[in-house]
Amino acid sequence: MERKAWMIKLKPEKIAEYKKLHANAWPAILKQISDCNIRNYSIYLREPENILFGIYEYHGTNFEADMARMGNDAETRRWWAVTDPCQEPLQSAGPGEWWVPMEEVFHLD
């Protein structure tokens, strides 16, 4: 098992919409996340900075393949088409980065 953490900005005018979408996440999306070996997935919002922080456990053996499978899923792409316009990459994001990875510097079980 490997923990992963990511950050992105949430557009202020999209906060209510984003919260509503995730309060009613589509069952097919939840299934796809699980099918791609992701467990214990949470997204947190920090206001007033409007930073989203996502953290999950990856329980698979090939993260890149699982993420490619997720990205190729039609329902996932449809979900991203409604959630992505709510977000904007951090200023420090590299080329092609959307959610930016974070480094774990401490953990206690």
Image (cartoon, rainbow, N blue to C red):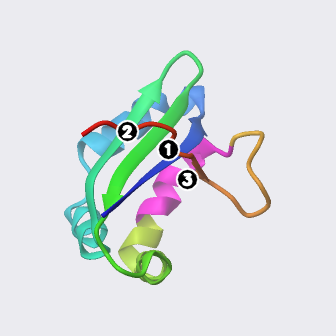
Mark 3 vs mark 1, foreground winner is 1
Callout 1 amino acid: Glu
Identify the image quadrant of residue 33: bottom left
Q: Which residue is mark 3?
A: 84
User: Tag 2: residue type?
Assistant: His
Residue 54: x and y in percent read: 43, 44
Q: Which residues are magenta?
A: 79-89
Residue behind mark 1: 104
Looking at the image, tell me whether mark 3 or mark 1 is earlier in sequence order.
3
Tag 2 residue:
107
Task: Out of 11 and 70, give the one closest to the viewer.
Answer: 70
Quadrant of the drawing holding the C terminus:
top left
Q: Is residue 22 above or below residue 2?
A: above
Q: Is residue 86 magenta?
A: yes
In the rendered image, the vertical position of residue 20 relative to residue 35, given as above or below? above
State yes or no: residue 34 in magenta.
Answer: no
Q: Is residue 20 left or right of residue 12?
A: left
Is residue 97 shown left or right of residue 8?
right
Q: Earlier in the sequence, mark 2 or mark 3?
A: 3
Q: Give me the C-alpha separation between circle 2 and circle 1.
A: 7 Å
